[in-house]
Image (cartoon, grey):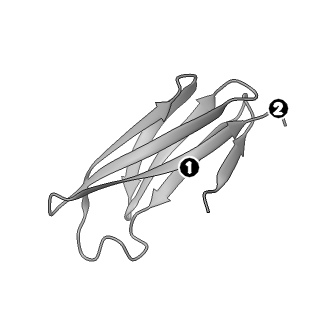
Amino acid sequence: MMSIFLKDPGSVIEHAVDWDAGYLAGRTISQSIWQVEPAGLTLAGARLASGRAAITLSGGWAGSVYRVSNRVTLSDGSSDERTLVVRVEER
């Protein structure tokens, strides 16, 4: 089941993907790329810490649903992607 995260258009919040939770198995994240679809939600402040890839989200249009994807490349050359679903609502 996919979770939907709620966000107010005026809020600035951080979301993260915990890649270390039984997934990395001794590997490290060598690259992390964030993307959003459709345009309208602002991504900033991407960072990596302890197997977690984090991004700060701001803006967005009330009533819109965004897919925020994190693609990582691991130290062994493999790659994977996780997507967060963010619905923007006046709160």
| Mark seen at residue 90 | 2
Q: Report x, y in % for residue 22.
A: 39, 77
Q: CA distance from mark 1 to mark 2?
A: 19 Å
Give the percent coordinates (x, y) of residue 81.
37, 52
- Name the image quarter holding residue 3: bottom right
Q: Secondary structure at mark 1?
A: strand
Res. 15 mark: 1
**Local crowd size for mark 1, using a 10 Å CA cut-off: few (<14), some (14–19), many (≥20):** some
Quadrant of the snapshot with the N terminus: bottom right
How many other residues sit within 10 Å of disc 2, few (<14), some (14-19) or many (≥20)? few
Q: Residue at x 59, y 35 (%)?
A: 66
Q: Amino acid at mark 2?
A: Glu
Q: Residue at x 48, y 33 (%)?
A: 36
Residue lying furthest right in this view? 91
Asked if residue 6 lies left or right of residue 42, the reply is right
Mark found first going from the N terminus, 1 or 2:
1
Image coordinates of residue 28 in percent, x first then y, are 25, 64
Which residue is at 50% across, 31% downward? 37
Q: What is the three-letter code of the residue carrying label 1?
A: His
Q: Is residue 57 above or below residue 31?
A: above
| Above or below for 74 versus 55 | below
